[in-house]
Amino acid sequence: IGMLANQKSYASVLKDTTASIRDTLLGLVLSDKSQELDAYLQRRHYPRKMLLEIISNPRKNECLSLLMLAALNGHDAVVRVILSYTSKEALMLEPTGKAHS
């Protein structure tokens, strides 16, 4: 039983950490802080994975990525930072979903 309690506390800490990272990234993107976003991502082990996360709002039936939020708000410098962490393969996709060869 003691082992399960430790696993639950570890899981809750991990969830809190994931939520705080998401909130930090969302705050930096929405407030157009490109330099702070870049510095924050440089300190992380998996920045590309963090940028792929989808922010969902079930009340409005919306699902947006951080890149979409930055573009919708006209934060060009933030868009450039996010794209700098994107794989070259992902950048080769057209909006219709076809891949360039």
Image: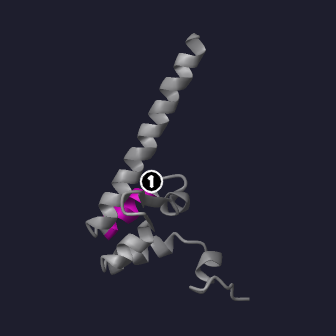
Residue 13 lies, in percent from the top left, at 45, 32
Q: Residue at x 33, y 69 (%)?
A: 34
Where does the magenta region start and end?
Answer: 34-41
Left or right, 55 with respect to 45, comes to: left
Residue 73 lies, in percent from the top left, at 30, 76
Q: Residue at x 41, y 57 (%)?
A: 58
Residue at the disc numbered 1: 43
Residue 69 lies, in percent from the top left, at 37, 71
Our reading of the magenta stretch's main secondary structure is helix
Residue 72 falls in which quadrant of the image?
A: bottom left
Where, quadrant-wise, is the C terminus in this rendering? bottom right
Q: In this view, does 86 lie above or below 4?
A: below
Left or right, 37 with respect to 9, comes to: left
Q: Which residue is drawn at 52% across and 31% down?
A: 11
Left or right, 38 with respect to 45, comes to: left
Decide: few, some or many residues near mark 1? Use Cα within 10 Å; few <14, some 14-19, many ≥20: few
